[in-house]
Amino acid sequence: KINSPLEAYKYLPQTNCGECGEPTCMAFASKLIDRSGKTSDCPPLVKEKKYAKKLKELDIILAPEIRQVTIGVGEKAVNIGGDDVLYRHKLTFFNKTKLFFDVSDNLEEAALIERVNKIADFKKFYVGRNLLLDGVAIKATSNDPAKFAAAVKKVAEIGLPMIFCSFNPAVLKAGLEVAKDKNPLLYAANKDNWKEVGELALEYKVPVVVSAFNDLDALKTLAKTFAESGIQDIVLDPGTYPSGKGLKDSFNNFLKIRRAGIMGDTEIAYPIMALPLTAWMAGIADPVSASYWETVIASVFTIRYGDIMILHSLEPYAALPEMHLAETIYTDPRTPVSVDGGMYKVGEPDKDSPVFFTTNFALTYYTVESDISANGIVCWLLAVDTDGIGVEASVAGGQLTSAKVKDAFDKAGFDLNKDTNHHTLIIPGLSARLQGDLEDTLGANVKVGPMDSGRIPGWIEKNWPP
Ligand code: SF4
C-alpha cells in the first residue's frame, strides 16, 4: 500500500502527455493517491504492452484496505466496502451503506411483486437528486428449492441487485440456476454448510457472506478458508443482536473487524453486513416498535462500519431516516455538495417577477428553492458559485462578493435593468453588508430580504412589488 504521489509516479509512463486530462504524470499520481482518479484513466498505461507489469503492480498497491465487492450487474449494481480509513475526515468513505429490503419466497406472486415494486419505487428527493433503496433480499422461508427459484425469477425481472438468503445449499443453487448472470450475494456460509456454499460461490462466481454469530475467531477462519480456496468477494456477518445488552457486543465486533482490516489484517479486510431486521425477531409484537428498533440498529451500524444491511420496514418513518443518515455519513468531506452556478427559474417568471440570489451550496440552494416554490412564488433565482459554501460563511470568507454576484449575472446573460421592469435584486439577509457595494456594482436597486428563507413568503407579501 502506498500513500505518496511520488511512489505512484514511479509506476506511470512519466511522459506528461496529458491524455488523462492532467498536465503532468505527477498531478495524475496525486489523483491516484486521493482516489479521485483510476489507473484506467491513463491511456498509455492501459494500452501499451510495455507498461502491463507496472499497471498490474500499481493496481495491487493502490487497492483499498477493505476489499470492494460488487453485487448485481449493470447500472443498478452496487459496490460495498472499498474503504481506506476508520474516520471519514482522514480521507472520505467511499461506498455508502447499501440498504436491501427483504421479501419472503412464500408470498403469493401478486404480493411478492407488489412488495418488490415498492422497494424499487421508494424514493426521496434530497439536495437535487433522488435517494433510492439498493436491492432485495429474498428469504427462503419455504426452504423449498423450486419455490425459492420461482421467487428469484420474479424478483430478477425488476432488475435490482439481490441477496439470496438461505443456509440450505440446495435452495441457493436453485436460485443461482435461474439468475446465473445477475451476480447475487449469497447469504450465508456458516460452520455447517461452508463447504457446499463455498463451492457454489466458486462455481457461479458470485460474492458470498460468511456468518458466525458473535464469534470473531470462527468468522475469520471461515473468511480465511474461503480466500485460500480462491473466493475473493467475501462479506462478513458477525451477527446483529436485536436490542439491549447484545447490541453492544455486535457494535464492538464491527469496530474490531474494521479496525483490524484498516490496520492491515488482510484476512478480515472485507465489507461487513448488519441485519437490523433482527428487530422483528426479538418478540416485539407492535410493528411500530419493531420498526423503531430496526431504525435504531440501522443507525448504529451506518455510523460504525455496516457496509450493507438487510431491513424489513418500508414505512417512511423508518426508511427515510436510514437513507438520510447513510447519505450524510458518506458525503465526501473534501467536496462541498453544490449545484451548478447560474440563473434558475422557479415557475415561469417574467419581467415583473422578483429576482433572488443565494449561493450554490446545495443544501442552501434547495432550501431556498423549496421555500419559494412551496409557497407559489414565481421568480428568478441566481445561484452564485461560492465553491459550495453557504451565504454567511462565504461572505465572511470572501467567496461571496459584489463582483462575484455581478459575474454570475453576466455569465447567466441576465441584466437586471434590461430583463426586469423593477430593476431590483433581493439579497439574503445574511449578506446584508453587501447591499451598498452591490448597488454600485450592478447599477440596480438592492433590497435586503429575510435572514431565513422560510420567511420569504411573508417578506414578499409586505415588500413586493417594490
Ligand atoms: Fe502521464 Fe498517463 Fe497522464 Fe499521460 S495520461 S500525463 S502518461 S499519467
Image: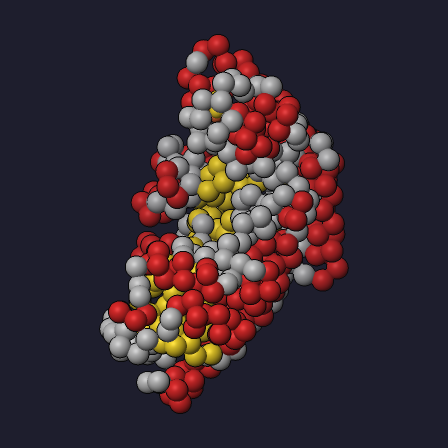
Residue 300 position within the rendered picture, expressed as x and y whole percent measured from the top left = 65, 57
The quarter holding residue 148 reads top left
- Seen in the picture, residue 457 relative to 328 is either above or below; the reply is below
Q: Residue at x 47, y 39 (%)?
A: 71
- Seen in the picture, residue 154 relative to 128 is either above or below; the reply is above
Q: Residue at x 72, y 41 (%)?
A: 259
Nearer the observer, 381 or 191: 381
Residue 402 position within the rendered picture, expressed as x and y whole percent measured from the top left = 47, 65
Q: Residue at x 39, y 59 (%)?
A: 408
Nearer the observer, 274 or 13: 13
Colouring chosen for the image of the structure: secondary structure
Nearer the observer, 272 or 146: 272
Outermost residue toward the top in this view: 50
Q: Residue at x 51, y 34 (%)?
A: 37
Asked if residue 113 lies left or right of residue 324, the reply is: left
Residue 391 position within the rendered picture, expressed as x and y whole percent measured from the top left = 52, 66
Check the picture and name the quadrant holding the N terminus: top right
- Seen in the picture, residue 163 relative to 444 is either above or below; the reply is above
Q: Is residue 247 visible?
A: yes
The quarter holding residue 398 reads bottom right
